[in-house]
Amino acid sequence: MSKGSQVVHVAVGVIEDEQGRLFISRRASERHQGGKWEFPGGKVEQGESVQQALARELREECNIDVEQCAPLTVVEHRYADKAVRLDVWLVTRYRGQAKQLEGQEWRWVARHELEAYQFPDANIAILDCLRATQ
């Protein structure tokens, strides 16, 4: 990505439950890439590490406290209107009952079921990474 463009840095959590299912939610229709499915997360704030942002976002958005996570991949993608850097972490242990607190539709899905859902283009690399680690 060019140095002159503003890149939105996002911490993304791929939350896996004990059955190996993954937590996804549908973006609100009025938001960027609205109506598509995504893994939860949000912007990394100034002065915050990626892991701090991930923990904060998953607490606020999904009602869980991350206990164990590991880096999965980093994705840089340019849309027509913005550039994003997705710092993606696999969350394998957490406290709390995962649910969507921001009113979005959500569900647990098996990895092989992810193909049935439409994700933003930036998420395609995440899906490819998850397929490779099945």
Image: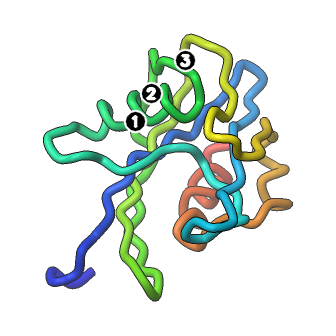
Q: Earlier in the sequence, mark 2 or mark 3?
A: 2
Q: Amino acid at mark 2?
A: Cys
Secondary element at tag 2:
strand
- Between 66 and 111, the one lying in front of the other is 66
Mark nearest the camera among 2 and 1 is 1
- The residue under label 3 is 93
Q: Quadrant of residue 81?
A: bottom left
Secondary element at tag 3:
strand
Between the C-alphas of marks 2 and 3, the distance is 7 Å
Q: Is 130 above or below relative to 6?
A: above
Q: Is 134 above or below relative to 66?
A: below
Secondary element at tag 1:
helix
Which residue lies at the image location 52% right of the left edge and 29% below the top edge?
91
- The residue under label 2 is 69
Which residue lies at the image location 77% right of the left edge and 53% below the top edge?
114
Q: How many marks?
A: 3
Q: Is 11 above or below relative to 51?
A: below
- Please give the label number shown on residue 87: none
Q: Are marks 2 and 1 in contact (CB under 8 Å)?
A: yes
Between the C-alphas of marks 2 and 1, the distance is 10 Å
- The residue under label 1 is 54
Residue 41 percent across, percent down from the top left: 48, 44
Residue 77 percent across, percent down from the top left: 42, 74
Q: Earlier in the sequence, mark 3 or mark 1?
A: 1
Q: Are marks 3 and 1 in contact (CB under 8 Å)?
A: no
